Amino acid sequence: MAAYVVAVNISEEKGTIKHPVDEVHLKIDEGIQGDAHAGNWHRQISLLAQESIDKMTALGVKNLTPGIFAENITTTHIELFSLPVGTRLQVGEAELEVTQIGKECHHHCQIYREIGMCVMPAEGIFAKVIIEGTLRAGDEIKILS
């Protein structure tokens, strides 16, 4: 089964849950236009697999919607955290390069405080924009290299 985008999500402020939108515009040296994490750095865009979110649901966490882990792109049918840094992904019409796997969680989120764990630090990945484009839910994801 092909990998694809489940949802595209943004937030206006850092440290807050992102909310799904119809589409996002990716720009080189910026990331997602209008997102609080946009900027010329190595973590322009965050990705998390629906399968990782489902692990938290299986542990009893309720109401997990796309963006709740502050991910910009919610995916399915691709094991993101196993991709090496430097992997290129075609996501819709855009191209991304994986720059980081996981991250240290300095300020634990509400989910971590409730159940003592969170999937984003271990299974979320970060990328920068290589080729600009517009992304929407349903866009296919292909591993390029």
Image (cartoon, rainbow, N blue to C red):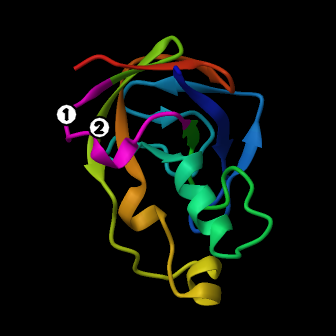
Near-viewer residue (5 or 134): 5
- The quadrant holding residue 35 is top right
Near-viewer residue (135 or 87): 87
Above or below, 79 relative to 114 = above
Q: Position of residue 5 (x, y in %)?
A: 60, 29
Q: Earlier in the sequence, mark 1 or mark 2?
A: 1
Above or below, 12 relative to 6 = below
- The quadrant holding residue 98 is top left
Q: Position of residue 73 (x, y in %)?
A: 56, 39
Q: Which secondary structure type mostly characterizes the magenta part of the structure? A: loop
The answer, for residue 16, to whether it is visible in the render is no
Q: Quadrant of the C terminus?
A: top left
Q: Dot 1: what SS?
A: loop
Q: Which mark is residue 98?
A: 2
Residue shown at 34% from the left, 59% from the top: 102
Residue shown at 35% from the left, 35% from the top: 128
Q: Is residue 110 left or right of residue 140?
A: right
Q: Dot 2: what SS?
A: strand
Confirm whether the magenta stretch covers residue 22: no
Q: Position of residue 137 (x, y in %)?
A: 69, 27
Above or below, 91 relative to 84 = above
Q: The disc labelled 1 sits on which kind of residue? A: Gly
Which residue is disc 1 drawn over? Answer: 86
Residue shown at 65% from the left, 36% from the top: 8
Cα gap from disc 1 to disc 2, whole angstroms: 5 Å
Q: The disc labelled 2 sits on which kind of residue? A: Val
Residue shown at 66% from the left, 53% from the top: 67
Magenta stretch, residue numbers: 76-88
Confirm whether the magenta stretch covers residue 80: yes
